[in-house]
Amino acid sequence: MVRERQKAPKSYVNRSLIASIHPHGDIAEQYRTIRNNIQYAANGKKIRSLLVTSSSEGEGKSTAAVNLAVCMAQRGDRVLIIDTNFRNPIINKIFNVQTSPGLSNVLGQQLEIREAIYNTEVEGLDILPSGQRMYNSTELLDSQIMVDVMEFASEHYDMVLLDCPPVLGISDTNTLVSKCEGVLLLVKSGKTQLALALEAKRALLFAKANILGVILNKKSG
């Protein structure tokens, strides 16, 4: 099994982890519904890897990804979140860990994947931060090493969630579509323009993504 490298501080729970802080609240229930609907959308097939993206930054996809992961872990699944957003990593901030070492160090063959994984205080949920920023990220994410990372993760976890950059304007996300069994596209009410949402959908379909659904993130307040 994955060797424990370092745990996030026990006293820290980010307010973004609403499904962990308030597991019986309405928002947590909505994420559990999304969790269950994923399998319905897959026509009974067991989905073991998901890519979460949006059309642009600031739409809440990372928060959605981690809360969905929490609900999966609460069901008893072993879950790994991989932050593939090298330009604007968020997962490490949510769980209060360092950005590096992380995925970029693994792809750069500086260390093994098991050495870059953090445990979290959410039982059953581990994270692989992005690591240091890379300027050849598309090539490395499209490499055999990334395939090996996904194979390792699938062997050791029930679900692997990729928190990806926005699909428009950045080629990184489309290179990862073929490495996941399903894709979730997040749109934010009052922010995401319809034209951009449709363009994002077309870009994902062009990359032959298996789009399982769209998550509507409502504006707070």
Image (cartoon, rainbow, N blue to C red):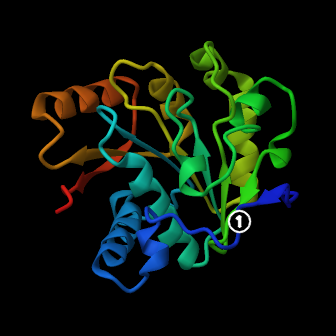
Residue 59 visible in the current orientation? yes
- Nearest the viewer among 58 and 174 is 58
Name the residue located 38 percent from the left edge and 86 percent from the top edge: 24
Residue 45 visible in the current orientation? no
Left or right for 63, reference 202:
right
- Near mark 1 (Cα within 10 A), the count class, few <14, some 14-19 or many ≥20, is few
Name the residue located 48 percent from the left edge and 37 percent from the top edge: 164
Left or right for 87, reference 16:
right
Q: Find residue 93 and report its horizontal and vertical position in percent.
A: 56, 49
Q: Amino acid at mark 1?
A: Pro
Q: Find residue 114 and report its horizontal and vertical position in percent.
A: 83, 48
92 to 34, vertically: above or below: above
Name the residue located 75 percent from the left edge and 35 percent from the top edge: 148
Q: Find residue 189 and report its horizontal and vertical position in percent.
A: 15, 49
19 to 130, vertically: above or below: below
Left or right for 111, reference 20:
right
Name the residue located 28 percent from the left edge and 79 percent from the top edge: 26
- Point out the image quarter for the N terminus: bottom right
- Nearest the viewer among 79 and 180 is 79
- Nearest the viewer among 84 and 144 is 84
In the rendered image, which residue does mark 1 sit on?
Answer: 9
Residue found at the far front of this picture: 11
